[in-house]
Amino acid sequence: DRVSHGRLATGPPLQRCRAFLAHLGLVPQPGHRPGPYAILKIDTEKDWTAVARQLKHLDESPTRESMKVGVLYVAPGQTNQREILHNAGGSPEYESFLGALGWTVDLRAHRGFAGKLDVRHFSNGTHVPYFCDERVEVVFHVATQMPTVATDPQQVAKKRHIGNDFVQIVWNESPRDYLPCTIGSEFNDVIIVVTPLRRAGAPAPARTYRVRVLKKDDVGSFGPLAAHETIAGQ
């Protein structure tokens, strides 16, 4: 039976659990000495402050692993950071690839992991590709979807996020190989370069793609693709 004079019937599950333990005398209340069966021994106001701080930290701890992945588009003929970070869109094939990464979420309503994007003023845009399952949440920092500042040749706002991502995906439509030093950063441990291989008259799903996995020496092996693979489309 619910406690009619307490507050067990309403509130978040964690709050109801705390109230239930307090009613059993297992968790002391402010101003009361802990009973003989208390699982927490809290005697002073300082103790209560410390416990409240730790509980707040616990409440904010994510239950799933969270990851941020940068995504760059390299148009034909582009070779440097300035050109690449100024892209505000890409080819239809690239846009289709973005749609396959996950689903688009509106940061103004999204309550999950936001990849450290600005969810107060939305200076990085309002929509991002997002993927999650029972174990992980992934937010993709897509350079072409972030606002491009015409007066900023370095596009600092874009690079602030993408340059700090441990993993980058580069969709490369340039005939030249993408070099890891193109977007200079100490934090990009793995760069996955996807290059469409053109065949005259072939529709996009029938094309093949060259995938190069570039990683730092201290990063271990991982799959499912090896360092250099050629794979078919859908």
Image: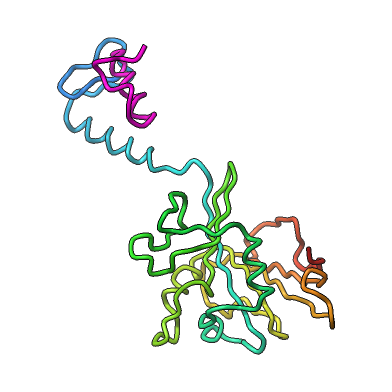
* Residue at 33% from the left image edge and 19% from the top image edge: 20
Name the outermost residue toward the bottom: 77
Q: Is 52 contained in the magenta span?
A: no
Tell me if residue 82 comes above or below residue 12 in the rendering. below
Name the colouring of the figure: rainbow
Q: How many marks?
A: 0
Q: Quadrant of residue 177?
A: bottom right
Q: Is 7 contained in the magenta span?
A: yes
Tell me if residue 92 comes above or below residue 233 in the rendering. below
Residue extent of the magenta highlight: 1-26
Q: Position of residue 140 (x, y in %)?
A: 54, 62
Tell me if residue 63 comes above or below residue 67 in the rendering. above
* Residue at 67% from the left image edge and 86% from the top image edge: 76
The residue nearer to you, when weighing 174 against 40, is 174
Q: Position of residue 86 (x, y in %)?
A: 51, 83
Q: Quadrant of residue 220?
A: bottom right
Q: Position of residue 185 (x, y in %)?
A: 51, 73
Q: Quadrant of residue 41?
A: top left
Q: Is 177 situated left or right of 185 in this image?
A: right
Q: Is 23 situated left or right of 176 in this image?
A: left
Q: Quadrant of the N terminus?
A: top left
* Residue at 32% from the left image edge and 37% from the top image edge: 54
Q: Position of residue 87 (x, y in %)?
A: 54, 81
The residue nearer to you, when weighing 183 against 17, is 17
The residue nearer to you, when weighing 197 against 159, is 197
Q: Quadrant of the C terminus?
A: bottom right
Tell me if residue 202 comes above or below residue 205 in the rendering. below
